[in-house]
Amino acid sequence: MLKLKFIGTILIIAVILCACSKDISNPSETTITKQVEGTSLHVEPIDLFAGEARKFQPFLGTMSGAVKFKYNGSKNDITATIELWENGTKTKTYSSISTTMQDSLEKTKDYEGEFIASIKTVSIEGSKPLYEITSAFANKNGTSSAVTYIDRDSSLNGSNTIQLNQTLDVEDNEAVSVWGMQATDKNEWETVDFTPERLKTARWALIFKLSVN
C-alpha cells in the first residue's frame, strides 16, 4: 500500500512539473511571434552605382539614391511620398508614386523590391528653374516610375544627398524615411539626417518616405 501511495505521489509531481513547464514556455513563444510579425517592412541602404552600374550615373545624376526593401504581410500597395522642409519646418507633402505588391489574388508575402530616386534641375523657357524628381519601384517583374516637378529656389546654390546609413525594420503602419536631398544658400553645411532634431537645422530639404497600405 505504501509503495502504491509513493508511486502515486511521484506521478502527481510529474504532472505538475509538466504543466508548469508548459505554462512558462508558451509566453516566450508568443512574445517571439509578436516581435517577428510586428516588424514586417524591412529597408536597407544600397549603392545605386556599385560595380558596373556606375556607367548609369551620368544619366541619373549625382543627386540619386536607392534602397532595397522587403515586405511580409497582408497589405497590397507600397507608396512613396516626398516631404518638403524649409528652414527647419515641414511645409508640404507631395504624392510621388504607388505600386501594387500583389502578383496574384493571394495575400502579399515576401515581396522584395527597390526604390530609386533621382533629382535634376530643369529649365523651361520663360519659367523659373524646376526640380525634376523621378521616383521608381523595381522588382523581378519590372519597374514603375513617376515624375514630380517642384519649384527650385535659385538662391540655393549648393546641394547634397541625405543617405540612409542603417538597416531598418518597422511595423507596416509606419512611414519610414529612406532617402533625401538638402540644399543651402550658405557657405557651410549642417549635418542633416532623418531625425526631426536634425531636420530642424536644414535650410531646405526633400525627404522621401515609404509606407505600405
Image (cartoon, grey):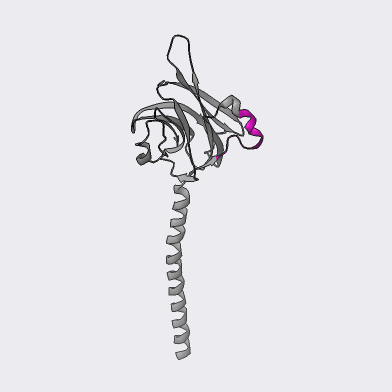
Q: Is residue 47 magenta?
A: yes
State which quarter of the image contains the N terminus: bottom left
| Looking at the image, residue 200 lies above or below residue 34 | above
Residue displayed at 47% across by 86% down: 4
Looking at the rendered structure, the number of numbered marks drawn on it comes to 0
| Looking at the image, residue 87 lies above or below residue 7 | above
Per the rendered image, the range of residues in magenta is 46-56
Q: Where is residue 177 in the image (x, y as percent from the top left)?
A: 44, 37
Residue found at the far right of this picture: 52
Residue displayed at 43% across by 12% down: 127
Residue found at the far top of this picture: 126
Residue displayed at 64% across by 30% down: 55
Residue displayed at 42% across by 61% down: 27
Q: Does the magenta stretch include residue 174?
A: no
In the displayed structure image, the side of residue 105 where residue 198 appears, left or right: left
Q: In terms of image quadrants, where is residue 213?
A: top left
Q: In terms of image quadrants, where is residue 81?
A: top left
In the displayed structure image, the side of residue 199 where residue 77 appears, left or right: right
| Looking at the image, residue 46 lies above or below residue 80 | below
Q: Where is residue 50 in the image (x, y as percent from the top left)?
A: 62, 37
**Whether residue 1 is visible:** no
In the displayed structure image, the side of residue 205 where residue 50 appears, left or right: right
Q: Position of residue 101 (x, y in %)?
A: 53, 34
**Whether residue 127 is visible:** yes
